[in-house]
Amino acid sequence: MIRSLPTTKLYKSTYAIYVGLFFLFLVLPLIAISVLAFNDSDFIALPWNGFTLDWFFSATDEREGLFADSALLQSIYTSITTALIVALMSTLVGTIAALLFEEEEFRFKGLLYFLALTPLVIPGVILGISILISSTFVGNYVEKHFGIDLELFRPSYWLVILGQFSFGATYVMLLVSARLKKYDRTLEEAALSLKATRLQAIWYVTIPFLRPAIIGAFVVAFLLSFSNINTTIFLVGSDPTLPIDLYSRIRFSSTPVLNAVSFLIVLIITIAAFINFFVSRKKET
Amino acid sequence: MENKKSFNVTFYLLIVPVLLWLVLLIVLPHIDLLVSSFKIENDNGDMVFSLDNYIAFFKHKIYWLTFVKTAAYAIGVTILAFVITFPIAFYLTKVISKKNAAFLVLLLLIPLWVGELVTVYGWMVLLGDHGIINHFLMTLGIIDKPLNMLYTNFSMIIGLLYMSMLFMVVPVMSTLESLDDSLIEAASDLGASKWAIFTRIIIPYSMPGIVSGAIIVFMLVIGDYLAPNILGGKSSLWFTEQIYNEFLSTFNWNEGAAFGFLLLMLSSGIIWLALKLSGQKLEKVGS
Amino acid sequence: MGNILEVKNVSKYFGDFTAVKDVDFVVEEGGFFSILGSSGCGKTTLLRMIAGFLHESEGEIIIRGESMKGIPPEKRPVNIVFQTLALFPMMNVRENVAFGLKRQKLDKTEIDSRVNEMLSRVGLQGFEKKKVTELSGGQRQRVAIARSLVMKPSILLLDEPLGALDRKLREHMKVELKLLQKEIGTTFIYITHDQSEALVMSDKIAVMHEGQFEQIDTPRNLYKNPKTAFVAGFVGDSNRFELSSQEAESLTTTGGWTVSKPGIEKADLMFIRPEALILYPTEGDNDFEYFDVTIKTILFDGSNTKLSTIVNGSDEELLISLPQNAQFESLQEGDSIPIGIHRDDLKCY
């Protein structure tokens, strides 16, 4: 039980072992892929044949490392730009939605708020096919009546962005709303009484207060986009994002270069998480 | 009057982008999904209204059986996720110090942000016939031929659990954090056994977090594609895979739309039921 | 009546820090015993050891003649009312009060009758179905007390339960709690930092300071005859003087005020209660010290009005209680007035 209630030694140690096993379960796959990224073998398996960086840097035909694989590099680039654009759009609209729902009163607010939350509970696959169907519908209509074939309405780079944005904005809205709930509304009223317009009050007083949440939400939206596959898979066109590329490689032609990419992702996320951890800890003390 | 006018300008600046987002990307696409699920192509190549897509679902055993199986497995995984992670959430909030907990929480979040594809791939590498676990078991002489773990229901459940269970930990932890230790002490002081404290105080108190977590886990599992597809075997057909096939293999989008709509009904139905039974609102799930 | 609780030489260490140091006392059955001390003095630690949430590092706690060593909180015949009250938010009033009885697997009719009786005793009949979050501060208080009392504990431990209430309600609850304790006769151990709560309610008070008991006494004795300088300064209002020299039977303060007090041993501090000072005394009593003061200002506060004065011929400030009767209405700032005090009321340490 909790710290102040007496417990037996057996209980305590069983509990600690369980927690230990859980965390082992948690890190096991991450360690497994990371280790095999450096194994000098053509197969994604043990035994350990010695350390190599081939799966990062080699450029031979038998071993095409990550940095020599132009298709892979291209998909990483696509994923990064996609995620940046999605994060920007989601942050903008999500923040606006948070301000709208927290600060304004209007008819159908409840209904609209409900709609804004639905992406949380709609499976990503459904979002993907709905947007695919309706964009194709619009695209066909435009082509038929105006004779223009717009790429936006077919599975493409931009359709992926729209699809990921549709749920990214919800997460941003929730994160910003949470911070906005702690906001002392009199600050904005003070700005108004000092003859600021409402927009100025929001821009100079409210937004700076929300800045940490907005930055955090941007990062969350970026990561959601970067790792998304359920929605993306239906909307992707000729330029695959990294997860789509990896997915097809896993299914059809795996080499340890997959481990190299995965290792890099794990590494970057871990470093970012630790930086965030120490920065926020410093702020607290 | 001046003030009133500027108020309105701000309001429209706020509501227009939100309306565009919700109407164009949420409402209309789902209406289109529903409409196209009721259409089929007739012999002349025209689209006509029909119930055939839904009839096909009920007529073919493989479809509705997969549907039922997906739902049942999703419920099972949700329950498993709760059972496995509740002690962890409790440990991190109530047993160890805040400082140690902060580090472990960090560890919890890393797999979450790394993304499903990488972790599913990790399990593939671990569980395969020539995978790491079999390698170790064989080197240690515990087994002499590889255990068949990958491409089974077992590996699929591991994958589903792994990617979803952390979404249970986070909301449960946040309700447990607000649970005042003195409530537990008070219960103990009033003579409650450990079990009674657990079932009467801790679980009821953390119910909002459990429901939020369960809804998110269920939604993620039922809509997941990667774990069943990569880790599951021939027998572990998942309903999302059928939707995928309709759209990207057989190109029968209308039947795919019907399947999608059924899946949407199933997930919203169960979520609605969970909210109703626990007396919660959807707003709470988000926070 | 016998002793229901014996605390024998109990100490508690947290690492290098000594929270409770060699505390030794007994509580009589049916008494209202308070532990008074400022925050951090170790009183909560002591209470939590009696309740069983902490284990004593040294010494022993005995309840009804039985050692409590190794007995978990749920098995001890004590119940605690928490500072935060710790009402279960997911249960209504009745469920909160019945919680402990249900754990004992009593039959339903008995639970019902005991809960009803307790609720009516604390004046909460009709509130059974209310959520605890819908109650006022005073009602929540009563639920917490009822929830513990319904268990018929040998001792009820109260951890500053009035702390969260506003002043008016606290005054009211003090009286209510005292009457309730008298009526049901359960032994109460009450910890507080508020001396007025302790003085009003208790039969006995222990003053705690830096992990140790300074004095255990009745409220009247504690106030009249504080045994240590800490108690004299902590309990009630006092004028405090540092003594600079001591010759034969006369004491001189650092501010240059000399009083005579026969039979005094070495002392560093002197305390005088504002109400011990008599205005316009009839002179001639050898047990009295007579001197003049000049009024600096009048601090009007109803029945608690005081004069802020300077002792003539010194730099010492002296607060004097001013009875609110017509006799003293003409006093003004700058007036010089005669004052007398019984030498027993010059408390030196």
Image (tube, grey):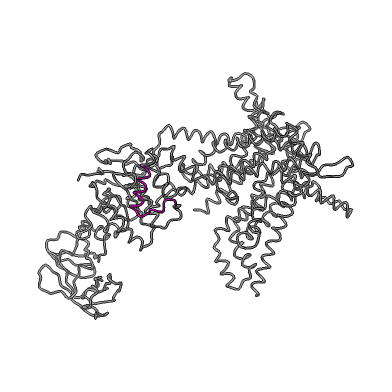
Residue B239 location (% of width, % of height): 70, 36
Foreground residue among B169 and C15 = B169
Q: Residue furthest top?
A: B144
Question: Which residue appears at 63% of the width and 29% of the height?
Answer: B154
Q: Is residue C246 magenta?
A: no
Magenta-drawn segment: C110-129
- In the rendered view, does A15 fall on the left or right side of C315? right
Residue B247 shows in the view: no
Where, by quadrant of the figure, is residue B109 drawn?
A: top right
Foreground residue among C260 and B246 = B246
Residue C279 shows in the view: yes
Secondary structure that dominates the magenta span: helix
Residue A161 location (% of width, % of height): 74, 50
Task: Please give the count of numbered marks on the rendered protein.
Answer: 0
Foreground residue among C33 and C263 = C33
In the displayed structure, would residue B35 be above or below residue A98? above
Question: Which residue appears at 58% of the width and 46% of the height?
Answer: B276
Residue A175 location (% of width, % of height): 60, 53
Q: Is residue C112 magenta?
A: yes
Question: Which residue appears at 46% of the width and 40% of the height?
Answer: B198
Q: Residue furthest front?
A: C109
